[in-house]
Amino acid sequence: METSKFDIADYLDNKEMIAEYLNTVLEEGDNSDVITAIGHIAKSIGMTKIAQETGLSRPSLYKALSDGSKPQFETIMKVLKAIGGGIRINPMTA
């Protein structure tokens, strides 16, 4: 039996799934996990499309959103906007 490699990007096929995935990573993951998750989302949408919307090259996006990278905040904000998301602050309860 042949198996295929699991790729979360294959399952991020609608805005609700993307939002749920990213919110879960934001709650449970660390900085690296969040950057990786944004990369998975960008891949699911299409790096060419994200590159066009952000004005960044595809190689720059792959590098910025790869495991262990430390992209600039401006890059993250551009990509979040391109994937249809943003940052919202909600007060935390004790």
Image: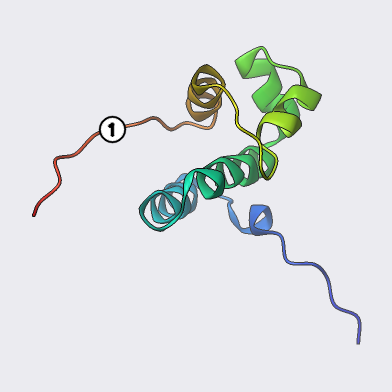
The residue identified by callout 1 is 88
Q: Which residue sits furthest bottom?
A: 1
Give the vertical position of 37 relative to 11 (above or below).
Answer: above
**Colour pattern:** rainbow
- Specify whether 12 is left or right of 77: right
Give the residue displayed 53% in from the left and 32% down from the top. Answer: 83
Q: Position of residue 6 (x, y in %)?
A: 73, 66
Three-letter amino acid code of the residue under disc 1: Arg
Q: Position of residue 70 (x, y in %)?
A: 60, 32
Label 1 packing within 10 angstroms: few (<14), some (14-19), many (20+): few
Q: Position of residue 40 (x, y in %)?
A: 63, 46
Give the residue displayed 69% in from the left and 16% down from the top. Answer: 56
Query: Quarter of the image containing the N terminus?
Result: bottom right
Q: Nearer the viewer, residue 85 or 69?
A: 69
Query: Quarter of the image containing the C terminus?
Result: bottom left
Which SS class for mark 1?
A: loop
Give the residue displayed 65% in from the left and 26% down from the top. Answer: 50
